[in-house]
Image (cartoon, rainbow, N blue to C red):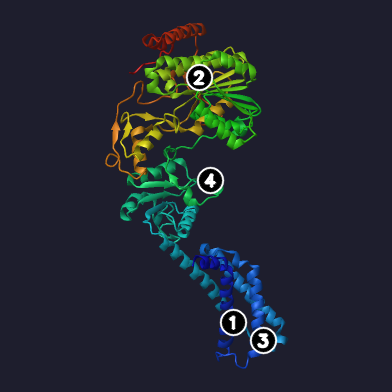
C-alpha cells in the first residue's frame, strides 16, 4: 500500500491533468448539446468531433503554458485560484478564435451561446474542483492532528497576523487554535481574517481572555513604538495568560523559515518602553576601521559583544585578552565560524594585574584603541573579597591605562557602571577610582581617555533576568531583594553601542552616560515575567523578599551632583563634566591602597577607599 501511495504521489500532476481533461470535455459536451435542446450529438457528429479535437489542443496548450501542474494545490491561495480562472478564460478565448479561423473546415459555426456556456461552465468547474481538493486537504491535515490545541488570541490584525493564520491553517502539526483577534484600528473591528473575527481593541484583552478561555496571547505587531508595545504587554500581563511574540518583519524575511517557528517568549527587552540605542557605523565607527584594537575582558558579556560588533568594522587586528580561558575560547570559536579567515584576530590569556605580560603585548603590537572591560563586577562577592576588587579593578585599570599612555595608544575607553556614582559597595567604589584614574591621565596624556557609565545589562553574567527565568522554569520561588528596589536596564548590544559611540565622540576626560528611560521596579519586573510566562504571581509562583545584599542600594544614579550634564550629538548620550583632582594626592592615596590590598587588611582598605572616594557610603 505504501508503494502504491508513493507512486500515486509521483503521478499527482498527471492525475490532475486527466481530471482537467475530463472537466473541459464534459463542459463542452453539455454546452454543445444543451444549446441544441436535444442533449445528443446525433446529426452533429462531424462538427462535434472536429471541434472536440480543436478544444483539446487549445486547452492543453494554454494549461501547459500557464504551468498549472507545477503548483502544490494543498497550499493554494486566492491568487492560485484566480490564475486557474485566467487560464480557463484564455483557453476558451483561444478556442473561440481557432473555431472562427477553421469555420470552413468545421462546416458550420458553433455559435456564440455555446462558447459562452462553455466558458462559464469550464471555468466554474475547474476552479470548484481545485477548491474542493484544497478544502479536503485542509480537513485532512486538521483531523490528522490529534493534539489538544492551545486557544490563541492574536494582537494585531496586520500582515504578520495574516501570515501566521495562513501558516497555521496549512500546518497539521501546529499547536495553536486561533480564536479571536484584537486591533486598535476601529475600522477592522467586527471583520474577519482567514475566518477569525477581530473582536475588539487591545483594551478588551482581559475580558476576551476570560470569555474565550484563552491559553496563549500572540503579539503579532512587528513594527510598533516601544512605548506602545510596553502598554499592550502591560495589558496582557493582567490576564495571567502566556504571551508569545513574533519578531520584526526583517527578521522574518531573512530567517527563511516558517513564521510559526519564529514565535518566541516575551523578553524583558520588550518591556523597556523606549527606543533602543543603535551604533551609527558610518558616523562614529571610522576610528576603528583599519586599526589594531585591544579588548580586555574580551570573553565576558560586554567584552564578547564588543568583539562581535568591532569585527564587522574591518579592524586591522583584534586582540582579545582575558584571564578566563573558557570564555575566551568561546568567543574565539564564534568569530572563526562567523568570519572565517576574513578577520585578523588573536586571543591572549593574561591578567590585567600582570604589568610585565601586558607590556610585552603593548611592545609587540602597535595598539591604536583599547576597550577596557576587564573587572570584577559581582557586588556581594566583592564585599567579602575587597582586596581582590582593588587589585583587579583599580590596579588592573591603572596598568592598562599607563601602558596605553606609554605606547601612545590613540583612544582608551573604560567600561564603568552607574554603581560608581555615590557608591555604597566596594565594587562601585573601585570603579569610581578607575574613572578618576583615566580622567587624571587624560590631563597630561596624548591618549584620549574616556569612561562609559551605564546601568544593569540584560542577559549579562550576573544579571537578575536569567536568574528570574530559571526560577520561574523551576516553579519558583522568584527571589527579590527588596519590594521597592529599582534599576535602570539596557541590552548588551545597547551597552556596547554606547561604548563604541563614546569612543567616536571622545576628546579626552569625559564620562558618557545613556538616557536609559524610566527606571524599572524589580518587583514589577518579576511579576510581569511570571504573568507573561502564564502563571499567577504569589499563587502559582511565589515571590520571596530576601533583603538587600551587602553593598546594594535601593536605586542607582548615573551622575554625581558636581558632574552636571552636557548634551552630545547623539540625543541618547550625555557627558558628565570632569571633576578636578589633585594628581599628587591621588598618587599617594593609591599607593597606600595598594599596601592595604597586599596586606589583606580589609578595615584599613575600606578606610582608604572612603578617603579616595568621599561619596562612598558603605552599606553592610
The secondary element bearing badge 4 is classed as helix
Quarter holding residue 59? bottom right
The secondary element bearing badge 1 is classed as helix
Q: Is residue 267 above or below residue 383?
A: below
Report which residue position mark 3 lands on: 109
Cβ atoms under marks 1 and 2 closer than 8 Å = no
How far across and down, in percent of the image, does residue 513 sit?
49, 26
The answer to whether 207 appears left or right of 389 in the picture is: left
* Front one among 282 and 172: 172
Tell me the crowding category of disc 1: few under 14, some 14 to 19, or many 20 or more residues within 10 angstroms, Cα based. many
Question: In 3D space, how far apart are the residues under numbered discs 3 and 2 (Cα atoms)?
Answer: 96 Å
**Which of the marked residues, 2 or 4, is nearer the chain's N terminus?**
4
Question: In 3D space, how far apart are the residues under numbered discs 3 and 1 (Cα atoms)?
Answer: 14 Å
Q: Residue furthest bottom?
A: 43
Report which residue position mark 4 lands on: 251
Question: In 3D space, how far apart are the residues under numbered discs 2 and 4 (Cα atoms)?
Answer: 40 Å
Q: Is residue 422 above or below residue 307?
A: above
Total numbered circles: 4
**Which of the marked residues, 3 or 1, is nearer the chain's N terminus?**
1
Report which residue position mark 1 lands on: 28
Nearer the camera: disc 2 or disc 4: 4
How far across and down, in percent of the image, does residue 402 sit?
56, 13
Report which residue position mark 2 lands on: 577
Question: In 3D space, how far apart are the residues under numbered discs 1 and 2 (Cα atoms)?
Answer: 89 Å
**Which of the marked residues, 3 or 2, is nearer the chain's N terminus?**
3
Question: In 3D space, how far apart are the residues under numbered discs 4 and 1 (Cα atoms)?
Answer: 51 Å
The secondary element bearing badge 3 is classed as loop
Tell me the crowding category of disc 4: few under 14, some 14 to 19, or many 20 or more residues within 10 angstroms, Cα based. few
Amino acid at each position: 500500500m505504501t508503494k502504491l501511495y508513493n507512486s500515486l504521489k509521483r503521478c499527482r500532476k498527471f492525475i490532475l491533468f486527466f481530471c482537467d481533461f475530463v472537466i473541459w470535455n464534459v463542459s463542452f459536451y453539455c454546452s454543445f448539446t444543451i444549446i441544441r435542446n436535444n442533449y445528443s450529438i446525433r446529426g452533429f457528429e462531424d462538427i462535434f468531433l472536429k471541434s472536440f479535437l480543436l478544444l483539446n489542443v487549445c486547452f492543453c496548450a494554454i494549461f501547459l503554458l500557464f504551468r498549472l501542474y507545477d503548483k502544490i494545490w494543498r497550499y493554494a491561495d486566492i491568487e492560485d485560484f484566480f490564475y486557474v480562472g485566467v487560464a480557463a478564460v484564455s483557453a476558451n478565448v483561444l478556442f473561440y478564435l481557432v473555431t472562427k479561423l477553421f469555420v470552413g473546415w468545421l462546416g458550420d459555426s458553433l455559435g456564440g451561446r455555446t462558447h459562452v456556456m462553455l466558458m462559464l461552465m469550464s471555468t466554474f468547474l475547474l476552479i470548484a474542483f481545485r477548491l474542493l481538493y484544497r478544502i479536503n486537504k485542509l480537513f485532512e491535515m486538521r483531523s490528522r492532528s490529534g493534539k489538544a490545541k492551545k486557544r490563541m488570541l492574536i494582537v494585531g490584525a496586520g500582515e504578520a497576523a495574516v501570515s501566521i493564520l495562513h501558516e497555521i491553517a496549512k500546518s497539521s502539526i501546529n499547536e495553536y487554535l486561533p480564536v479571536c483577534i484584537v486591533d486598535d484600528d476601529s475600522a477592522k473591528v467586527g471583520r474577519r481574517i482567514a475566518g477569525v473575527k477581530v473582536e475588539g481593541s487591545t483594551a478588551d484583552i482581559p475580558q476576551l481572555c476570560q470569555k474565550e478561555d484563552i491559553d496563549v496571547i500572540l503579539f503579532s505587531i512587528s513594527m510598533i513604538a516601544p512605548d506602545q508595545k510596553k502598554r499592550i504587554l502591560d495589558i496582557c500581563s493582567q490576564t495571567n495568560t502566556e504571551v508569545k511574540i513574533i519578531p520584526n518583519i526583517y527578521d522574518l524575511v531573512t530567517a527563511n523559515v516558517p513564521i510559526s517557528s519564529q514565535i518566541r517568549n516575551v523578553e524583558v527587552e520588550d518591556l523597556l518602553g523606549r527606543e533602543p540605542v543603535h551604533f551609527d557605523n558610518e558616523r562614529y565607527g571610522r576610528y576603528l576601521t583599519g586599526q589594531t584594537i585591544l579588548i580586555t575582558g574580551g570573553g565576558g558579556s560586554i567584552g564578547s559583544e564588543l568583539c562581535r560588533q568591532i569585527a564587522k568594522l574591518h579592524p586591522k587586528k583584534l586582540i582579545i585578552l582575558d584571564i578566563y580561558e573558557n570564555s575566551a575560547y568561546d568567543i574565539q570559536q564564534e568569530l572563526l565560524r562567523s568570519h572565517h579567515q576574513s578577520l585578523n584576530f588573536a586571543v591572549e590569556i593574561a591578567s590585567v594585574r600582570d604589568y610585565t605580560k601586558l607590556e610585552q603585548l603593548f611592545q609587540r603590537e602597535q595598539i591604536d584603541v583599547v576597550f577596557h572591560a576587564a573587572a570584577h563586577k559581582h557586588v556581594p562577592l566583592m564585599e567579602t573579597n575587597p582586596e581582590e576588587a582593588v587589585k583587579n579593578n583599580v590596579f588592573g585599570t591603572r596598568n592598562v591605562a599607563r601602558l596605553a599612555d606609554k605606547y601612545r595608544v590613540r583612544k582608551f575607553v573604560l567600561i564603568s557602571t552607574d554603581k560608581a556614582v555615590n557608591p555604597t559597595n566596594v565594587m562601585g567604589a573601585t570603579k569610581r577610582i578607575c574613572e578618576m584614574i583615566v580622567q587624571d591621565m587624560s590631563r597630561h596624556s596624548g591618549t584620549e581617555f574616556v569612561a562609559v557609565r551605564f546601568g544593569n545589562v540584560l542577559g549579562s553574567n550576573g544579571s537578575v533576568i536569567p536568574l528570574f527565568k530559571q526560577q520561574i522554569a523551576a516553579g519558583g520561588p522568584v527571589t527579590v531583594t527588596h519590594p521597592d528596589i529599582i534599576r535602570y536596564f539596557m541590552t548588551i548590544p545597547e551597552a556596547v553601542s554606547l561604548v563604541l559611540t563614546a569612543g567616536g565622540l571622545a576628546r579626552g576626560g569625559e564620562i558618557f552616560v545613556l538616557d536609559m528611560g524610566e527606571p524599572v521596579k524589580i518587583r514589577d519586573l518579576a511579576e510581569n515575567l511570571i504573568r507573561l510566562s502564564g502563571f499567577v504571581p504569589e499563587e502559582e509562583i511565589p515571590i520571596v523578599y530576601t533583603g538587600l545584599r551587602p553593598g546594594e542600594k535601593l536605586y542607582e544614579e548615573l551622575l554625581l551632583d558636581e558632574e552636571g550634564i552636557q548634551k552630545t550629538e547623539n540625543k541618547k548620550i550625555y557627558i558628565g563634566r570632569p571633576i578636578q583632582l589633585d594628581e599628587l594626592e591621588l598618587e599617594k592615596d593609591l599607593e597606600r591602597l595598594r599596601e592595604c590590598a597586599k596586606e589583606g587588611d580589609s578595615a584599613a582598605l575600606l578606610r582608604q577607599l572612603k578617603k579616595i572616594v568621599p561619596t562612598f557610603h558603605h552599606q553592610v
